[in-house]
Structures are given as C-alpha cells and as structure tokens.
Amino acid sequence: MNKPESVAASTDTLSPMLLAVLANRFDGVVREMTNTMLRTGRSAVINSARDFSCGITTGDNELFATAEGLPAHTYGLNLQTAAMCAFHDDIAEGDAYLHNDPYSGNSHPADHTMIVPVFWEGEHLFNVCAKAHQADIGNSLPTTYHAAARDIYEEGALIFPAVRVQRAHQMNMDIIRMCQRRIRVPDYWYGDFLSMLGAARTGEKRIHDIFRKYGKDTLKRFVTQWFDYSENRMRQAISQLPAAVIERESFHDPIPPFMLDGIPVRTKITVDPAAGTVELDLTANVDCMDNGLNLSEACAISNSVAGVYNCLPSDIPRNGGSYRCIRMKLREGAAIGKPTFPHSCSVATTNVSERLLNNVQAALADLGEGYGLAEGGIGMGAGFSVISGLDARHADHPYVNQLIIGNNGGPASPTCDGWVTYGIPVVAGLMYRDSVEISELSYPIHYREMRLCQDTMGAGRTRGAPGLLMSFGPSAHPMTVVFAADGQRNPARGVRGGTDGNVGRMDLIDEHGRETQMPNVGQFVLRQGQWLRGLDTAGGGYGDPLTRDPARVREDVLERYATPEHAFEVYGVVFTGHAEDESLAVDQTATVARRAALRA
C-alpha cells in the first residue's frame, strides 16, 4: 500500500475558532466511541470499571485525539496502526483489524484493540481505535496478569498482530471461532469484541460526518496546524523549566523466585529549555526478565511520557505534535525498553510501568520548588485481583473477572493534596471503580468491608491521598484468586521533604479468623467463609510537613483522614477541643512551639 498523502499538503492558516471547533469535534468522536463501549460492553471490566480507551490516529500513524483515554492505553495507538500498515499492503474501506501483539506496538496481550481505517474519497486519512482490557485471553492461568510466566508460551495468550477480522464489513468467523474455543468466557469475550467493533464503526461514521461538513482539504490543513499548535504549546511549557540532567532509580518489590532484590527502574532525564525538549533515556535498565513483568515498547514510552505530561499544564494537547518535543532512548532487549520475543509482557501495563511513571514525575521535582509530583500510590493489590470459578446461581456457569475495586491514593503536587479516587498511576483516576452492588450481582462475590485508612498518607506541605482497606470472599463455590501486587515493601515516595505513603499488605483470613500474610504475587483458592483482605497504598507527600497550613491539618482530622495523634507527631499541630463534636481548634501558640521542637 502506498503511504497516505501527507496531511501537510496545504498550509493555509485556519482561524483559531475553527481550530478549536474541529479539535472538540474530534474529541467528541472519541467520547461517543467511549460511551458506545461503556453502554454495550459485556464484561464488568468494561461496563463497570471502564478499563478501556478509544482514540484516533492519522493515516500516516501519528496519535491525533484521545479525549479522556487512559495513559497506559492511548500513547501507543500510533504504533499499532503503524503495524497494521506494515503488515498489510491492501488496506481498504470496510476493513477492521484485531491487534493485541506487545511486540508490534500493543501495550500487553490482555488489551485487545480494534482498528478501523477511515477513508474519504478513496484516501486513507485516519484510523479509529477501540482498546479494551479483556476478562480472559486464553492464558494458561485464569488471569490476564501472569507475572510468573517465563515466556509468551507459558503465558498462553492468544496473540493477534493486526489480524484482519472484517473485509468489506464481512466478519471472518474463523477468528471468532478460534477465540471462542480458547477463551474461558466466550460469551463475555464476544460481547466485548462486538462492543469494540461497534465503537470503532461509530467513530468511522462520525469522522465521515466531519468530512461532509468541512471537506477534505480543510481537515488536512487542520491536522497540520493542530499538530503545530500542540508542538508550540509543549515547547513553551518546557522552556519555562530549568535546564537539568536528572538520574533516578527506584525499585519494584521482589518477585520470588525471579527478582529477589526487586526490579530496578532507572531513568535519565535531560531537560533542555532552550530547545524546548525533554529526553527520556531508559537504556540503563536491566535485560528482559524471565517473567511477565517486562514492559512492551508501547508501555515503556507511554508511561515515561505520561510522567512528563503530568508535570506540565494540563491543557497541552497530548498528540503527535506535542510528542515532537520528547526524545526517547530505548534499548533493544531491555525489560524497560524494547522487549525481545518470546519474553512475556503479560503485566506490562501496571507494576513496573507504575514505578516508571512515578520515577519520571518524582525526578522532575528535583528541578526545584514548584516542579514535579510525588509518587502516586502503587500496587495491584487485593482489589485488582482476577477472580474465577463456577457461579452456583447460574447452573455452575464458569466466570472470570478482573476486579477494579481497589484504590491507591494519588500523589501530592506542589499546590494540591493527592486525588482520593486515583486508582493506580497508569490510569490516574480516569478509570472507574467497580460498583460493589453491580459486582455482587454479576459474580458470586461478597464484600465485607471497604474504607479509607487514617494516617496512611505521605505527609507534606501537601499530602498524598489515603489507601483503601477492603476484604472479599466467595458467596458459594470456591473462588480462584490470582494477583500480582507491588508496594508491599517499597512504598510510594514523597519528594522535597515529603514523607512516603504506607506499604500495602494482603492477608488471608480463614474460617476461624486466623490471619496469614500473603505474598505479593500468587494464586490461591478462597473457600466459603474465608476472606482476602487487602490494604492499598497511599500517595507520597510534597514538601516539609511542618509547613502545612494548620487549618488544613485540622480539616484532615475532621474528615478522619488523620488522627489528632498523627497531626501532633508528624505535622506538629496541637489542638484543643474534640473532632467528634467539631469543637476541634488549632492551638496556635502550642503549634509554633511544637514545630520548633520538631525542627530542632
């Protein structure tokens, strides 16, 4: 296939108003695709937790529009559409392609992506993408996060490197039958497959509507000028940063028996405000590992880039234009870089990716006061497990579901406390948490408790958000639980004098109430009367806790984020009165004395 005509065919300047209108029209297309998937997805991981993203790339494979797509999903869509173009020289209108190959642009095998090329007047000008995490993908274990897999073969996932599933709008049923035979919950998978296809076709139709209204020449000019505007906004933002070269290392928790000392995550960042560029050098990271925690190229790029964007003005468009200002240095055969086949990337989107994103945004705090972020709460703890078994309510029908009901606390910024409904760094609050009621109606699971935990947050001038404590168990038949957690030894770090968040923990509580701490990676069977209890992690703090406004500390105590004892010991704030009757008040004189004593 000939390369699509460059979108830079014309440079006649469009008005700022038309640029804004068209940018919002394309974001509106992505949002309509998103709403289509949310309304039609079959599995709870899509219709409840919203673990999916939609986006648009140009015909020459630059990321164009993602609206509120998850960072872990969207930044690599252009790599996937580039793979589609590389693998097929006869792409035509009416095609659709299924792509989940981590070695040719996808994030990890559990993220199935539907790609539909968009043509207008016979020219391939855009691609629409709908990517969704699946409840099951045919892994050797009933989970889509197989941390112990030594390679792709032991992982067992069905892999589709941009495989054509529709030609002239006609379905290739051979692919459908193959998936239905291998996947444990074929009805759920096929429902989600149709949901992705419906979302992509919806996006295709809406882009056709935009072409009808504005014409091909105007839209080509818009794409060029929108990318140029995005690049200029990015360069302006970077030009306001101090010049620096920063190197930072953090560690994922040990993964017995593979990485007994933990997994190092190393980043070298070069900020060049004169050139308006940031270079992210990941080449010092370890070679590919014989487990499932290797990052795909898409995840290595997306989650380091996300750490940069998190620290810049939020109104900068995240697309191929602003990407021009970020230089990536990746190494072939690295666990955080470009993985070599057949090393498994099963857990690529979370765990090590979370550490990488945290590493970048925390490193940027070294630029000085007011820059960067603390580390966000980490770890796919108990509330992010994959559960499976037989549902006694439905004639012992098998089920598999990825829970998205845990919650780690967000990081402190230079001006704001952490976001409570943060989730994990790679989704940054954009994914929904499962509904307890819908989860219990959909699956044979019962939740016993769920609450935010006091005194867990990283303290600082601004503080991190607290982690969640929760427990669940099966309502009848035994339930298999598979998990791959982090943050149970190495917490989310504070920056610029801020303290760390708490470490996480998982405990098995048996029928007699006895507690056994679980490893951070594993698989076990919960029986009726047993519970898995998980403590998620909190975000790190930013700045010296002794400079936090005492009125804000009082507010934390009243809201039960912190106890009066914690306020006294960590923040040096002394109160009179009681939180219970809201007579709590700051003793200003005693607080000044207490803080002076702590500083001494």
Image (tube, rainbow, N blue to C red):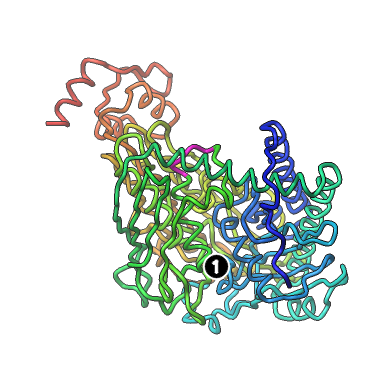
- What residue do we see at 72% from left, 59% from top? 127
Q: Is residue 111 left or right of residue 465?
A: right
Residue 398 at least partly seen: yes
Task: Answer with the quarter of the image where residue 563 lies.
Answer: top left
User: Residue 488 location in percent, x, y?
Assistant: 37, 58
Q: Quadrant of residue 153?
A: bottom right
| Residue in the picture at 52% in, 52% down | 323
Residue at 78%, 62% in the rendered image = 197
Q: How would you rate the neighbour count of disc 1 (Cα within 10 Å): few for under 14, some for 14-19, many for 20 or more?
A: many
Name the kind of residue labelled 1 in the image: Val
Q: Which residue is mark 1?
A: 481
Q: Between residues 106 and 125, which one lies in front from this camera angle?
A: 125
* Numbered disc 1: secondary structure: strand
291 or 383, nearer to the observer: 291
Q: Which residues are magenta?
A: 310-314
x and y, in percent, of residue 357 in the image? 43, 54
Q: Furthest-bottom residue in view?
A: 153
Q: Residue at x 40, y 39 (%)?
A: 239
212 vs 514: above or below = above
Residue 320 vs 574, above or below: the answer is: below
Instruction: Give the dominant element type of the magenta stretch: helix, strand or loop.
Output: loop
Magenta stretch: includes residue 311: yes
Q: On the rendered image, what quadrant is the N terminus found in?
A: bottom right
Membership of 218 in magenta stretch: no
**Residue 166 placement, left or right of 415:** right
Please say whether residue 49 is visible from this viewpoint. Answer: no
Give whichever of 498, 395 is nearer the camera. Answer: 498
Picture coordinates of residue 526, whole percent (x, y): 54, 67
